[in-house]
Amino acid sequence: MKKLIVCGLALSMLLYGCGSKPEETTAPPTTVPVTEAPTEPSTEPPTEATEPAPVDTNPLTGEALEEVKNQRPIAVMLNNHSHALPQCGIGQADIIYEILAEGNITRLSAYFSDIANAGPIGPVRSLRAYYFNIMRGYDALCVSAGGSSEADGMVRDLGYDRINGIGGVGSNYFYRDAWRRENRGYEHSLFITGEDLLKGAADGDMRLTDEENRDYGLKFDDDAPFGGEENTEITVHFRDGGKTTKLTYHEDQGVYTAFQQGFDLIDGNTDEAVPFRNVLVLFADTSVMDSEGHLKVQTTGEGEGYYARDGKITSIVWKRADEKSDFAYYTADGKPISFGVGKSYIAVVPTGSPVDLVGQPDA
């Protein structure tokens, strides 16, 4: 994957990195070179290395695995304010949801099937009820920095597993990045590493395995015929006149990358753009609940949307029976959608929000 970085981002964002914890340094061990007698070149033909046969599949991406993971998904709430960029660890996520929070600001929810080596993850932000309802469909362990009173009440009443960065089990593993706290604001500085996140889950005796070995409603098939119209660019508006995210298809790599708030969506740990094989835009009824601007987003029932893959896009219908159910996706004529193997970006936008399509003749 070649790096797709906006020059301004490389100059401005990389100054403050991803909140890595300071590490202790030790002198490397002293080694003494060993002189060996030269050996005669081998006349035997080289043997071809064989790759281990896959024994499992990542249920969030469809990718083949060399060992059985059976890990419960972990969903981390991430800040998406301009002062929080670049987010860190998102390149290791399998699925990223983007939904409005209050005002004209969105948040991200990153789903991981394997988080141990993700490095620093953040900035972590607070939970909302509709984000939590989606997490329940994946049976995902929740990671957030507190939440709205509605979301906190739901987590508490259900006794749901959550690692909370501002109190409770696992909070001691979070840390504030000093540079971001001073220069970007306290609320944009909270991080945790993937390794420490798992320690917090263990401290709370939280389940980390998927007991049902679910497929989460995601059917992967690279060879399944995929209709739709030619499409190279999708601009998602989070309500009319609201915040936008632009997804651009790169034919040479077969993936989409996202652009928002003047920058490519990159993982600050690697400085690389996050590649998405699948892009979904789901229309959901959205209303303002209170004077603080908290939203109600209807994530059950059914609605319309778009699905894009391999430079093509088609209209879809999404269905979801209840908060414990998976999303199911169908073409307009009722056929189940087959996903391409790889990562997915899913935008949930208010019904009626504009979606600009480039490369589709009738768009």
Image (spheres, grey):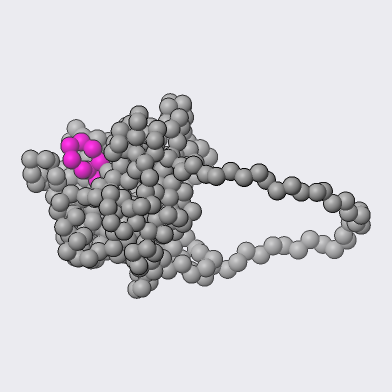
Q: Position of residue 334 (x, y in %)?
A: 25, 62
Q: Is residue 324 left or right of residue 56?
A: left
Does the rendering let one see residue 354? no
Q: Give the residue drawn at x 24%, y 53%.
A: 131
Residue pushed farthest bottom?
A: 212
Numbered range of the magenta stretch: 99-106
Q: Position of residue 275 (x, y in %)?
A: 44, 45
The correct choice, above or below, for 104 with respect to 76 in the image is above
Q: Position of residue 328 (x, y in %)?
A: 27, 62
Could you say which is closer to the camera, residue 71 or residue 219?
Answer: 71
The correct choice, above or below, for 282 with respect to 263 in the image is below
Q: Give the residue drawn at x 45%, y 30%.
A: 15
Q: Quadrant of residue 104?
A: top left
Query: How many dots with numbers?
Result: 0
Q: Give the residue drawn at x 52%, y 44%.
A: 23
Q: Give the residue drawn at x 42%, y 40%.
A: 19
Does the rendering let one see residue 178? yes
Could you say which is closer to the camera, residue 349 or residue 139?
Answer: 139
Q: Quadrant of residue 159?
A: bottom left
Q: Main secondary structure of the magenta part?
A: loop
Q: Position of residue 154 (x, y in %)?
A: 17, 59
Could you say which is closer to the camera, residue 357 or residue 327?
Answer: 327
Q: Is residue 200 left or right of residue 2?
A: left
Quadrant occupied by the C terminus = top left
Does the segment drawn in magenta span residue 244? no
